[in-house]
Image: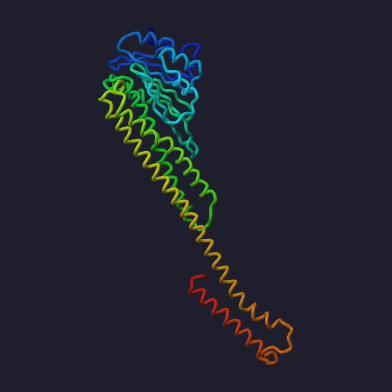
Amino acid sequence: MNPTAPAASASTSTSMVVNCVAYRSTGRRIGDVDIDAISEVLEEPDTFVWVGLHEPDETLLLKLQEEFNLHDLAIEDAQAAHQRTKIEAYGDSLFIVVQTAQLTGGHIAFGETHIFLGPRYLITVRHGASLSYAPARRSCEHIPELLALGPSYGLYSVLDFIVDNLLPIVRDFREELQELEQDIFAESFNRDTVRRLYDMQRDLMTLRLAVSPLQDVISQLVRLHPQLIPDELRVYFRDVHDHVTRVNDSINAMREMLSAAISVNLSLVTFGQNEVMKKLAGWAAMLAAPTLVTSWYGMNFQHMPELDKPWSYPLIIGVVACLVGGIYIGLKRAKWL
């Protein structure tokens, strides 16, 4: 075996192979290995391999299937890249699908990570919006005594990395909602504000559908699969489960806040429209009184009350003024004006 061989062979695109690293059972890094040399690494006792891929093609996946003896159905799912969050057991290996998310341009972009876990290998396959798991791998290498527990510690680091990147998304949405509060409570209607609140609520709904099933997946890792998950690592997976629960609770709370914000905004808009309608109705009532009186005296009848008196015109003006003034005072007390 040549541990310093390039990370991918000439026939394999380096853009698809992010890393392919061999480790000793002590948790110490051996070095980068060629995809074609994986079988040679696994022939040596007390070694395991961690492979990271980004949107691999069918040829590369079939090559990995040959090297690690992966199940056909798991390879088919990894190639399709449109799977729900789940965990499947195939003999002494696990196939895990996790939804990932990134905040780009104020909207959440979603992706998938497919994970193959075996006694001597860990394979991560990223599709769509997803950060590189190189930081998680470096973190494991800095704690070789835990990495000595096997590839399952790498699985913990990857899942923890995914979950830790979800909470800032909810936090950014909460900060944006606080910035929108001034527009929410504004007297004038702003269609863009309501549209943004709706978009945030839609993105959080999709994020909740991705996060909620992850609780069941990690719960299985905490309780089951003793052949792959040592008892020493179960406390770490319980910690990830707590983080997922926290993220899920934060998403639910944020969705309720957004629903309340939309309801408050629409209620304030409706209240403002009602106030305008009340004022218009009040002014219309004041205009109706003189219109009624003058319409009577605009009819061409020969006998009209006080028509032949010299003080008739000032009297009618006074009556109209009293009627309008009385209506104004009544509407003012009723707070319609």
Where is 327 relative to 29, above or below? below
Between 237 and 191, the one lying in front of the other is 237
Q: Quadrant of residue 221?
A: top left
Indicate the position of residue 122 as horizontal and vertical percent values.
Answer: 37, 20
Query: On the picture, is 225 further left or further right than 302?
Result: left
Residue 231 drawn at (x, y percent): 25, 25
What residue is drawn where x is 45% and y is 34%?
102
On-image quarter of the N terminus: top left
Front in this rendered view, residue 167 or 216: 216
- Residue ID at (48%, 21%): 76
Q: Is residue 236 left or right of residue 278?
A: left
Q: Residue furthest bottom?
A: 309
Vertical comparison of 333 with 27: above or below: below
At x 47%, y 44%, the residue is: 201
Q: Quadrant of residue 167?
A: top left
Q: How many marks?
A: 0
What colour scheme was applied to this rendering of the protein?
rainbow
In the rendered image of this protein, does residue 269 appear above or below residue 175? below
